[in-house]
Image (tube, rainbow, N blue to C red):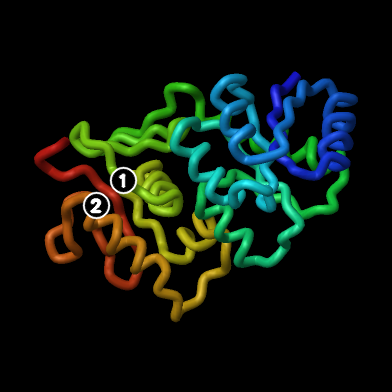
Amino acid sequence: MVKVLLVEDDATIRSGVVRALGDRGHAVATAGNALAGLQLAVAERPEIVLLDLGLPDLDGRELLRMLRAVSPVPIIVVTAAGAEQEMVRALDAGADDYIIKPFGAEQLDARIRAVLRRVASDGPGAAIIVGGLRLDSRARRATLEGRVLDLTPREFDMLHYLAARPDQVVTKGELLTHVWQIAYASADKTVDVHLSWLRRKLGETAQEPRYLHTVRRVGIRLSAPTDAR
């Protein structure tokens, strides 16, 4: 049984999801607006949240950011907004998956299982440590020499992907495929921009790198500084 929190303002959809997931053995709590959903998320500690973006009191993406600030709970956005840009904005805000309405009960159940498998595979103690850099994938928290880094969801994902492969050169195409989940384009400066932001937050520059090293015409390598090994 999975403890699910559904934040959805449409009563018909709420009852349908509760019935469908209940038939599959899950326990579903529901909220019809963002503030009630936030309160339930804190009080009930669900294992996963299904979040509609079109809520009456608060934009769903704002609630997504609020949830991310107080809990590492996996979040699946469930919405009628099917535009690619909407999907990107939700994933950038911290969503773990995105389902477009209308959807079938089997698909929803499969998505829940898939997200929970990914979370479980990280393990409760799956912190990545490279030199003075520490990343906790469950809490989505990064620290450098004990100082918490103020990273956006995309910056955390990029740094986590690199830190999970210390001393390996990772290409920009690989980052775009696995972090952004988009195809590589030679003119795309997305990785360069985020890399520049990450370096600033790590207190380094391209000219004087400590952790993030550019391998010319190949990619990026994250390595512990020699004074931290």
Task: Give the secondary structure at mark 2.
Answer: helix
Can you say whether 87 is above or below 124 in the image? below
Residue that numbered label 2 is attached to: 201
- In depth, the one of 72 and 195 nearer the eye is 72
**Residue 142 at x, y percent in the picture:** 33, 38
Tell me, for residue 150, which label it has, or none. Answer: 1
Are the residues at dot 1 and dot 2 in contact (C-beta closer than 8 Å)? yes
Q: Give the quadrant of residue 193.
A: bottom left
Choose between 214 and 15: the one closer to the eye: 15
On screen, 84 above or below 199? below
Q: Residue furthest bottom?
A: 187
In this view, the residue in front, 28 or 54, is 54
- Label 1: state its secondary structure: loop
Alpha-carbon span between mark 1 and mark 2: 8 Å
Q: Position of residue 32 (x, y in %)?
A: 72, 38
> At which x and y percent is residue 106?
86, 39
Residue in view at x 77 percent, y 21 percent: 27
Q: Position of residue 147 (x, y in %)?
A: 22, 36
Q: Residue at x 89, y 29 (%)?
A: 19
Image quadrant containing the N terminus: top right
Nearer-N-terminus badge (1/2): 1
Outermost residue on the left side: it is 227
Q: Quadrant of residue 188?
A: bottom left
> Type of residue at label 2?
Lys
Using a 10 Å C-alpha cutoff, classify the residue at mark 1 as few (fewer than 14 neighbours), some (14 to 19) or many (20 or more): few
Q: Which residue is farthest front?
A: 57
Residue beneath the point at 68% across and 48% down: 56
Q: Tell me the kind of residue under disc 1.
A: Asp
Q: Is residue 120 left or right of residue 130?
A: right
